[in-house]
Amino acid sequence: MTKTYSTITILIFVIIYSILSSCSSSKITSSWKSDESLPIKVNKILVVAISKSDDAKDVRLKSKMEQHICDDLREKGIEGKSSAIEFGPGFFDGVTENSVLQKMETSGYDGILTIVLLDKERERHYVPGRMYYTPYIVYQRRFWGYYTTIYDRIYEPGYYEINTKYFWESNLFLLKSKNLIYSVQTKSFNPADTETLAHEYGMLISRDLFKQKVLLEYQ
């Protein structure tokens, strides 16, 4: 028997597909790994979000970014620790490299994963008005049902919207050799909130570290 699909059913499929394909606002734009023997086995990584801003929102975002990556690393069997929680927000201020490395070695760390906000762009974009056309069968076969539905949808006036783009970079350094073994750049477009931004970023970086065979998964 031949299957036929109504216009409403097709529209529902299109809407669902659009929602699913736009769930994530973040994506990796480029990544690099060293020529060292990889994947490498590490037990404990310190996650450090680097920022000079003292703004309360930036401090909260920094903490969330660190914590989400730590959570995603732990799911892979690697102990991740937030620098803000482990050592305090001002641990790296006014200290020498040797004292920091000694403290980290004493605490059992194998590597340092940094997070830096490279740039943030805000754009004011005009969305022009649009005229809609949809066959009347989508609504109802009676005049009033058609009229009340189409009246509000036949024209959508133009409006301005503000788009925000975040450009991030993360680098993974080995503590013993002090070498950079992995670097990744990402772009986030209009994240819903800081929690969503941190969650998406943590998953992206954690997955790419294992996808690129930089780190050895314990599970």
Image (cartoon, rainbow, N blue to C red):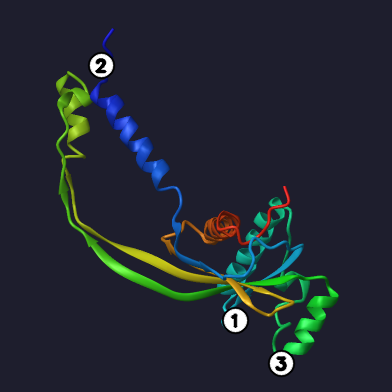
Q: Mark 1 points at which residue?
A: 54
In the displayed structure, does residue 85 sit left or right of residue 63?
right
Tell me if residue 97 comes above or below residue 24 in the rendering.
Answer: below
Q: Horizontally, is 105 left or right of 129 in the view?
A: right
Tag 2: amino acid: Thr
Between circles 3 and 1, the one closer to the viewer is: 3
Q: Which residue is drawn at 63% across and 59% down?
A: 68
> Does residue 114 sit above or below 209 in this rendering?
below
Q: Residue beneath label 3, please?
A: 94
**Location of residue 32 in the rendering, given as x and y in whole percent from the top left corner:** 51, 68
- Dot placed on the residue nearer the N-terminal end, 1 or 2: 2
Q: Nearer the viewer, mark 1 or mark 2?
A: 2
Q: How dense is the environment of label 1, judged by Cα within 10 Å: few (below 14), some, or many (20 and up)?
A: few
Q: Where is residue 147 in the image (x, y as percent from the top left)?
A: 16, 29
Instruction: Kindly report the distance in space between the C-alpha atoms of the residues bearing marks 1 and 2.
Output: 60 Å
Q: Is 53 positioned to the left or the right of 125 in the image?
A: right
**Mark 3 and mark 1: Cα distance apart in space:** 17 Å
* In the image, farthest residue toward the right: 106
Residue carrying label 2:
4
Residue at 39% in and 44% down:
21
**Residue placed most toward the observer, 61 or 149:** 61
Task: Give the farthest residue toward the top.
Answer: 1
Residue at the image point whose x is 73% and y is 63% from the top = 42
